[in-house]
Amino acid sequence: MQATASQSDPIISFRHVNKIYNNGTVGLKDINFDIPRGQFLVVVGLSGAGKSTLLRTINRMHEISSGEVLVDNESVSAYKGKSLRQLRRKIGMIFQNFNLVKRSTVEKNVLSGLVSYYPTWKCVLGLFSADDRKRAFQALTRVSLTKKIFARADELSGGQQQRVAIARALMQEPKIILADEPIASLDPRTTKAVMDTLQRLNREDGITVIVNLHSVELAQQYADRIVGLRAGELVYDEDIANVTTEALDHVYQTDSEV
Amino acid sequence: MSYPEMPQRPWSQRHHVRAIVWTLVLIILLALSSWATGADFGMFLANLDQFTVLLVQMAHPAWDYLSVIIQPLYETIQMAILGTTIGAAFAIPFSILAAHNLVSNKYLRGLIRFVLDLVRTLPDLLLAAIFVAVFGIGSTAGVVTLAIFSFGMVSKLFYEVIETIDMGPLEAMKSVGASKITIIWYAVLPQVLNQFVSYFLYTLEINVRASTVLGYLGAGGIGVYLQRSLDQFNYSATAMIILATLVVVMVIDGVSNHLRRVLL
């Protein structure tokens, strides 16, 4: 069973995590599971099921109402100020809308992944070391975008922008990458390029990757393990070997159909 | 093949009832307000020939007067640039603190906005009168007046620009572990810079015109000469001053358009 594998060395653990929004909406309901180091985990579920919220509780972009989220066996709730920034530094994040600064160059966007390693005044003046500029170039090499290094981000196609966003995350030297619907605004071919890149980072660098996806087919193709959310509840959790399409469909049923 | 008969337009639409009623209402309101304020249209028409006389005199600009006003005009431009730059520099931090998408503390934001409203309420002529009294006659008073006037105006324009930005890059920078200042520098400024420049130049243009009036109060620049020419009924000189100011405004407008294209 999954549980025995997780207990050995979980990088992330959810312990009775609840999230209730100010307007009373339940975001997450008693979430309990562990994510082992180096796993490629895909979270599936309908829009509004709480996938984005779940992802963002890990790097505290969203606060939880009760329970505990542990990263490297430490509760993230206690962090603030500098220690919170250091937590976020080891967790790269990829977004549906890429979230690049469109008017800045690709190089500057990639270097911006490093800012938590530098004091603020050096970031403002753009004083990055020659070594780090070389690393930015290497990060772009890994996502096959070296030719675009001095182009402005808005000159790039959607798939290229997402790869720049991955390069930015790589600069953080992350232990974890969170990807929130990374391919929702991309066409099928660029989707493959982006998912393959994430898979490579997972296999070659041992980065734990957690991806929110709509598509069950993609989930089955890339995941080591699939968890399903419905209305804020964890309703599905299987290793890829045990995943069946019929059982997954259950995740996508609305409450009235259950 | 037969088409269904086209429906008749209702009577009120055919006779433009709404447009006619609105026009009548506007005319009545205008007449009422002129009666209430005592503005006399009869006098306006009766004295129209005076205006024509003035126009005829102004139609012959005193071209040689240019050599006299070139130095004060230069001073006016310097005053405007200095005043606008100082005002805009102070406006940047204030506009960041006033933007609701950057500052979630609504009391701080409310306080900043109150200060900005207060600054904008002060008429520039009042400011000029005060600062002439404080700093004495000369361009220092003009620069300080323009700086405060631009600060109030530019802050509002700036924070409205900031409130329209894409919040995505801010979320990304936050997730990277960036500090607040770094987030503003990397994710906010690149998105607003070209509009900041454009509003800066617009304010500069307004300040060139405003400083001609400030000269009336002794705040330096071309205004002193404008006042003198009007006092001496030397309308050909007045026309020259207006023409020269127009050229300056047009140049700023041209630079502004060019920069906006380049920066976009």
Image (cartoon, rainbow, N blue to C red):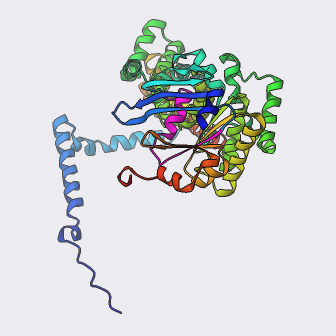
**Relative horizontal placement of residue A200, taking residue A31 as reference (left or right):** right
**Relative horizontal placement of residue B180, taking residue B19 as reference (left or right):** right
| Position of A32 relative to A142 (above/below) | above
Q: Furthest-bottom residue in view? A: B1
Residue B245 makes an appearance in the image: no
**Relative horizontal placement of residue B40, taking residue A41 as reference (left or right):** left
The residue at the point 60 percent across, 15 percent down is A82
Using the image as rendered, state which of residue A213 and residue B208 is in the foreground.
A213
Q: Which residues are magenta?
A: A40-62
Residue A139 in which image quadrant: top right
Residue B32 in which image quadrant: top left
The residue at the point 33 percent across, 44 percent down is B49
The residue at the point 81 percent across, 44 percent down is A147
Using the image as rendered, state which of residue B11 and residue A38 is in the foreground.
A38
Quarter of the image where the N terminus of chain A is located: top right
Using the image as rendered, state which of residue B24 and residue A186 is in the foreground.
A186
Q: Position of residue B139 (x, y in %)?
A: 53, 15
Q: Position of residue A47 (x, y in %)?
A: 47, 47
Residue B227 in which image quadrant: top left
The residue at the point 22 percent across, 37 percent down is B39
Residue A168 makes an appearance in the image: yes
| Position of B77 relative to A210 (above/below) | above
Q: Position of residue B148 (x, y in %)?
A: 47, 19
Q: Position of residue B83 (x, y in %)?
A: 54, 20
